[in-house]
Amino acid sequence: MPKRLIDTLEQEYNEYNDLISGWKGAGLNPFSPRQVLNNLPTPLLPPPSTPNTPANPEDLDLSLLNSSSPNDIELRQANKVLNSALSANNLLTSPVQRYAKRITHQIESLNAENAILRKELQEYKELLETRKKRKNGKRIKLKGEFVFSTEEVLKIIEEAEQTPLPKRRHGRPSKRQIDQVEEEMEEEEDNDSSVGSVIVVDHPVACRTRSNRKI
């Protein structure tokens, strides 16, 4: 028998013995279930999860969700509690946490901007209401004050100038006439004190006075 053939047979025999030995060690030949289970690799245990303490619902002011203009301080505190709860939750990924922080910061900025716009709108409304009270060419009464246009004042002066003055009687006036004049003056003073102040609204009209007339 050639030597080469002998070497080949010995090599195959050794491989067969190694295979049988491996099956025996694994419990496959003869079959042994207990030995098979003992040779299986031990599964890796998951790392112990830290208990997550959820945020207390009382810390979150849920009334902010129903209010149209939340307070800046309350909104900032609620966002802080929300971001802390999201950071403590390991189930959320980092992009989700970053998005939550950015959106809460954006809400705070928009709330501050809305507060400024509301204040400016109120100022514009007050200014517009004040302008509506000014009526050109009309006589109105505003908080105890009479408002006249320049044209009306000139008309009153013109009518007063055209009214003839009563002729004075020569001689010394009687005591009865003096008393009557004093009573009329007192009545005029009382009437003047009861009437509110007079405001003249200027208009671009021609102003005529006594000094401009030729004598």
Image (cartoon, rainbow, N blue to C red):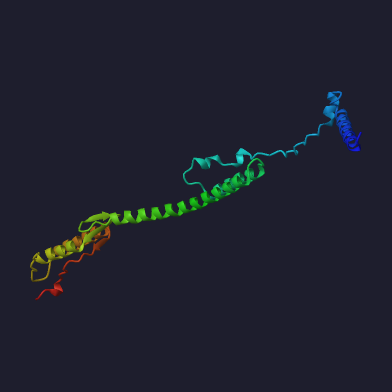
Residue ID at (22%, 60%): 148
Along the viewing direction, whichever of 171 and 58 lies nearer the viewer? 58
Along the viewing direction, whichever of 157 and 187 lies nearer the viewer? 157
Residue 94, position as x, y percentages in the image? 63, 47
Q: Residue furthest bottom?
A: 215
Left or right: where 191 falls relative to 32: left
Residue 93, position as x, y percentages in the image? 63, 44
The reply to whether residue 165 is visible in this rendering is: no
- Note whether 197 is above or below 63 in the view shown: below
| Quarter containing the N terminus | top right
Residue 137, position as x, y percentages in the image? 20, 58
Left or right: where 126 falls relative to 106: left
Q: Quadrant of residue 27?
A: top right
**Number of marks in the rendered image:** 0
Q: Quadrant of residue 152?
A: bottom left
Left or right: where 89 falls relative to 135: right
- Note whether 132 is above or below 16 in the view shown: below
Left or right: where 171 falls relative to 148: left
The reply to whether residue 81 is visible in this rendering is: yes
Along the viewing direction, whichever of 171 and 140 lies nearer the viewer? 140
Residue 124, position as x, y percentages in the image? 36, 55
Along the viewing direction, whichever of 57 and 158 lies nearer the viewer? 57
Q: Quadrant of residue 36?
A: top right
- Note whether 183 is above or below 15 in the view shown: below
| Quarter containing the C terminus | bottom left
